[in-house]
Amino acid sequence: EMKTRPAGIGNVHADWMGSLPSKLSAMPLRHLAVPGSHDSFTFWVDVHAPVGPDQKVYVKYLATMFSVLAKKVMVKWSMTQNLTFKEQLDAGIRYFDLRVSSKPGESGNEIYFIHGLFGHKVRDGLLEISSFLGRHRKEVVFLDFNHYYAMEAEHHVYLISMLQEVFGSKLCNNCAVENVTLDYLWEKKYQVIVFYHHPSAQGVPVMWPGNKIPAPWANTTEPIKLIEFLETTLKERDKQGSFHVSQAILTPTVNTVAKGLLWGLRSYLVERNLPTIMSWVEAQRPGVDGVNIITSDFVDLTDFANVVIKLNNLLLSEQNRKPR
C-alpha cells in the first residue's frame, strides 16, 4: 500500500538551486530570488538590552539571558526557532541572518547563537550546514554575521578561523558581486558566502564585507508601512556591487511583546498581518530592479520558501516584466 508522506517540513526544495534552468544559473545571483530566515527572537536582545558604551552592563544582561533560557522560561517565539538548520535548508532557505555572542563568565573563546537557537554553539550549527552542503553539492548558502555581542578580538579570530576550518574550500572568495553566478560557484566548487560585519575580517579573502549585503530594516509593527518601506528600498537598490536583502519583517514593540507573552506573539502579531506580507512577496519579481534575498518571520517557512523560489520562473518569461 502507498504510504503518504507525513505533513510538515519536507525536503521539497533541498536541491532547488541545482535544479534551476541554465538560463538562470548563468545569471548573477544578485538577480535571483532567494529565501532567507530571520528570527525575531533577536528583538529581545536588541530592545531590552542596555545600550551604550558600558559593555559590562551588557555582559551582565547576556549572562541573565543565558540563565533564563537555560531554565526554559522563554516562550517559543517563532516557527523559525523550532526548525534546525537542516530543516530550513531542506525547505529551501539559503540565507541566514546570524547574531553571535560569547557566553559571559565562561573561559575560552566559544561562540554561541543569540537568536533562534539561542545558546547553541555556532560550531555545531556550521557543521550541520556543512554536512548538508556535502550532500547537496550545487546548493549555496549566504551566512550573514551581522551582530556580535560581548566579543573581544580573540573571539573574532576564533570565529573566523572556525569558519575557515569548517567550510574550507567551500568558501567563496570576496570578488565582484556581478561575477557571482551559480555556474561560477559550481565551477569553483564554492558553496558558502560569508559576510562578516566587523573590521577583524579585513584582509581575509573569504570574508565578504557587510556593505556587499545591505539589509534595510523597517522597524515597524504596521504592514502598510513595512510594504512602503520595502518598495522604496528596492527602488533605491544599488544597480551593482551588492546583493540585497528585503526584510519582510514586522518588529514587535515592547508593548506588543507584553501582550504577546499572554497570547503568544505569533497569533497576536502575525495571523492578522501575514496575508498582507505574503501577497507583497507573491507580487515581486527578481531581476535587475527586483528582489533578491527575502527574509520573513513567523511564516510557515516551507510555504514562504516555496513562494520565493517560484518567483524565479518569472525570469524565464521576460515579457511578464512588472513595471516599477
Image: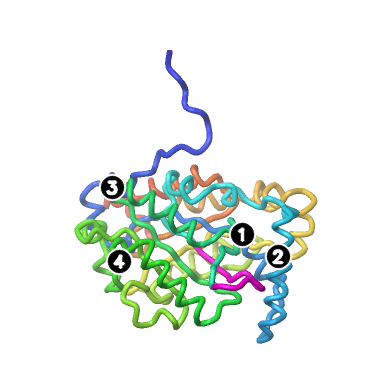
- Residue 171 in the image: state x and y as whole percent: 32, 65
206 drawn magenta: no
Q: Amino acid at mark 3?
A: Gly
The residue where tag 2 is placed is: 65
Is residue 306 among what the camera can see?
no
Mark 4 crowd level (few <14, some 14–19, many ≥20, 10 Å Cα): many
Q: Earlier in the sequence, mark 3 or mark 4?
A: 3
- Residue 50 in the image: state x and y as whole percent: 71, 77
Q: Earlier in the sequence, mark 2 or mark 1?
A: 2
Q: How far apart are the two marked residues, 3 and 4, measured between alpha carbons? A: 17 Å
Q: Earlier in the sequence, mark 4 or mark 1?
A: 1
Q: Amino acid at mark 2?
A: Met
Q: Secondary structure at mark 1?
A: loop
Q: Amino acid at mark 4?
A: Cys
Say which residue appears at 62% left-offset and 64% top-offset. Answer: 42
Q: Circles 3 and 1: CB distance less than 8 Å?
A: no
98 drawn magenta: yes
Q: Circles 3 and 4: CB distance less than 8 Å?
A: no
Quadrant occupied by the N terminus: top left
The residue where tag 4 is placed is: 172
Q: How far apart are the two marked residues, 4 and 1, measured between alpha carbons? A: 27 Å
The residue where tag 3 is placed is: 18
Say which residue appears at 75% left-offset and 65% top-offset. Answer: 254
The residue where tag 1 is placed is: 118
Instruction: Report the span colored magenta.
Output: 97-108
Q: Earlier in the sequence, mark 2 or mark 3?
A: 3
Q: Circles 2 and 1: CB distance less than 8 Å?
A: yes
Q: Amino acid at mark 1?
A: Phe
